[in-house]
Image (cartoon, rainbow, N blue to C red):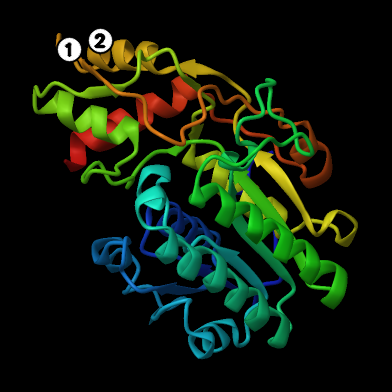
Amino acid sequence: MGYKDLKFQKDSIFLVTGAAGFIGSNLVEAILDLGYKVKGLDNFSTGKRENIDLFTQNQNFKFIEGDIRELATCLDACDGVNFVLHQAAWGSVPRSIEMPLVYDEINIKGTLNMLEAARQKGVSKFVYASSSSVYGDEPSLPKKEGIEGGLLSPYALTKKTNEEYANLYTKLYGLDTYGLRYFNVFGRRQDPNGAYAAVIPKFIKQLLNSERPTINGDGRQSRDFTYIENVIEANLKACKGSHEVAGQAFNIAYGGREFLIDIYKFLCESLDKSVEPIFGDERKGDIKHSNADITKAKEELGYSPDWCFAKGINEAIEWYKNNL
């Protein structure tokens, strides 16, 4: 079962932080479509106003422009809320290596503010975005919770710290927290622009413009690319999670493995382009291979992803064709 048949109390209120971002805006849209009330919080440091404009006419949506680095803002946002879906963060491994202090402020202190606000306001469930980057240099595949290696970037450190704080908030204060270790999420509204853009939207945009994309390394790195619909399902299923599994982190992926060079060739074929890529240097801090064991999320959260990579990438291509 996906998420569209899930039922919550009819007066439930969800708070989505990072609501103007790629994942956040998709969560807002899905929850509103299910008929529940949503508060959105964002400061537009990476999110886009046009993503919020999609929902401003919906009477079930309330938006707060604010920063998770301010506790008062977090307390205001959590007031009256049943479920927090905390997506606000700065992504990008390379940028975190360049700007570690900013990552500490936003990703660690901001998340701690949200946890504390949720505790003080009596929130029922606190679901937050973690990352596959926490596996670091652990070489074994598939990646399994509890078998992590040495961290490779400040970004990874922020996500691991979030998991430790969330676990403490469950143990010490009884706040049910659920960490979702996302594996390379992609899909509609993911930003193709900028130096730190994710690879799939960036490749699609460049190919549509007949530009030569740069592949970092030899293209033989592999990823468990995860379509946005699976991530929406995971967040909403976690809101139904039992207290017994609170305080833990869960791999959220499809459980597949795609090589970057193969994806590039597929995109060229799908877009009817014949463009030779440029092969650049490997990126510092990147994990070479990533593939998730999703058994724990299936067994303990009822996670059952419907969207394989092939199904998701075709939907994404069509969206970018119509929206770029």
- Relative to the observer, which residue lies in front, 196 or 190? 196
Q: Quadrant of residue 244?
A: bottom right
Residue type pointed to by label 1 = Asp
Label 1 crowding class (10 Å Cα cut-off): few <14, some 14-19, many 20+?
Answer: few
- Where does the image place residue 137, in percent across and percent down from the top left? 61, 30
- For this rendering, which residue is in front, 63 or 201? 201
Give the residue at x 16% y 23%. Answer: 207
Residue toward you, 303 or 30: 303
User: Looking at the picture, which amino acid does disc 2 mark?
Assistant: Glu
> In the image, 126: left or right of 311?
right
Secondary structure of the residue carrying tag 2 is helix
**Residue 105, percent from left and from top:** 47, 70
Quarter of the picture containing the C terminus is: top left
Q: Which residue is drawn at 36% across and 25% down?
A: 282
Q: Name the residue under label 2.
A: 269
Q: Which residue lies most toward the right here?
A: 244
Q: Note whether residue 5 is visible.
A: no
Q: Position of residue 189 (x, y in %)?
A: 32, 47
Position of residue 278 relative to residue 86, above or below, is: above
